[in-house]
Image (spheres, helix red, strand yellow):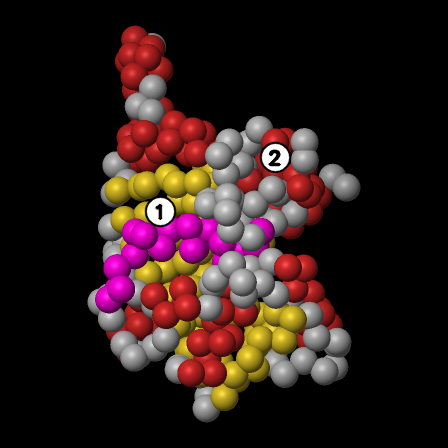
Amino acid sequence: MKKPTKAIITDAGFASRYLPIAKTIPKGMLPLGNRPIMELVVEECVDAGITEIIIVSTPEGQPIYEDYFNNAVNHVRKQLITQGKEERYQVVRHVLDFPKIRIIVQDPALPYGNGSPIVSAHNYISDDEAFLAIYSDDVVFGASDAKSLIDAFTKHPDAAAIIMAQEVDPSVVDRYGIISLKHGDKLDNIVEKPAVGKAPSTLASYGRYLLTPEVFNYLKPNMTGLDNELWTVDAVTQMAVRGDVYVVKTKGQWMTTGDPKNYFLAHLKYVLDNEDYAEDVRNFLKKD
């Protein structure tokens, strides 16, 4: 398999936990600081050497993403020049300078599930190339999972897939898909939300994958699992039966933005780590 140069980033769900705002704004466009989550994920891929990105969205989300990554808002730039504030436009230029970004809509004929957006981008993946698949509601602070995945593929070019994992506290394993390992760093199975004290490890799987086209053999409309949904993790687990799926521990800190509470915590961490008003936020929090 060729080294990955493409990434599929998914944001095609209903995001029902974010209603009513999700009926108008894609979940991946929620901000961390003054940048949307999706931009940070794209940036992670670009910094790892990815040259083509396919964002899979809802029909409502497609024009919003097209606008964000392609609209130069020249009228805003002209106004900023007039006001002597052109430096504020540099963040827009940064977005426009990303490499090729293609926005597609999830195939409506496919079942619901986090595997369906990946299948929707199948035509853009050649039979001889590995690729990254990333859920846009997973963010990683302090390191690049995209780079870790590509580095691991360089070490294991025979891999059927490579997945990222993070150690979690033993008391919360029942919230996650927990990894069972074999032969050191290879996937045996993923146990969904095991009871505390009965988990095979404390390694939680999340939405950062390096996949080969073999995955499409197991992501078919008639291969639905829990809740009659098409699950990426089911496909990866089946790949591990027939080949080597490697597990890589993140060097950063994974946080989900999949629900309002965890989104707020991720947003807070981003602000405290990156924004020039972080100290004001810390002081505000100390008042309580």
Q: Is residue 97 left or right of residue 66?
A: left
- Residue at the spot x=29%, y=33% of the render? 96
Relative to 216, residue 274 above or below = above
- In the image, which disc is placed on residue 54? 1
Which residue is situated farthest in the top direction here? 82
Q: Amino acid at mark 1?
A: Ile
- Residue at the spot x=65%, y=47% of the render? 259
Quadrant location, the C terminus: top right
Which residue is situated farthest in the right direction here? 288
Tag 2 residue? 22
Relative to 183, residue 273 above or below = above
| Label 2: element kind | helix
Relative to 262, residue 102 above or below = above
Q: Amino acid at mark 2?
A: Ala
- In the image, which disc is placed on residue 122? none
Q: CA distance from mark 2 to mark 1?
A: 21 Å
Relative to 90, residue 157 above or below = below
- Residue at the spot x=31%, y=41% of the render? 101
- Residue 229's spot in the image, x, y percent? 60, 58
Q: Quadrant of residue 203?
A: bottom right
- Residue at the spot x=39%, y=41% of the render? 104
- Is residue 121 found inside the magenta-colored segment of the image? yes
- Residue 275's spot in the image, x, y percent? 48, 39
- Circle 1 packing at 10 Å, graded few (<14), some (14-19), many (20+), is many
- Residue 102's spot in the image, x, y percent? 32, 41
| Label 1: element kind | strand
Q: Quadrant of residue 216?
A: bottom left
Q: Which residues are magenta?
A: 112-129
Front-lying residue, 168 or 184: 184
Q: Quadrant of residue 166?
A: bottom right
Quadrant location, the N terminus: bottom left
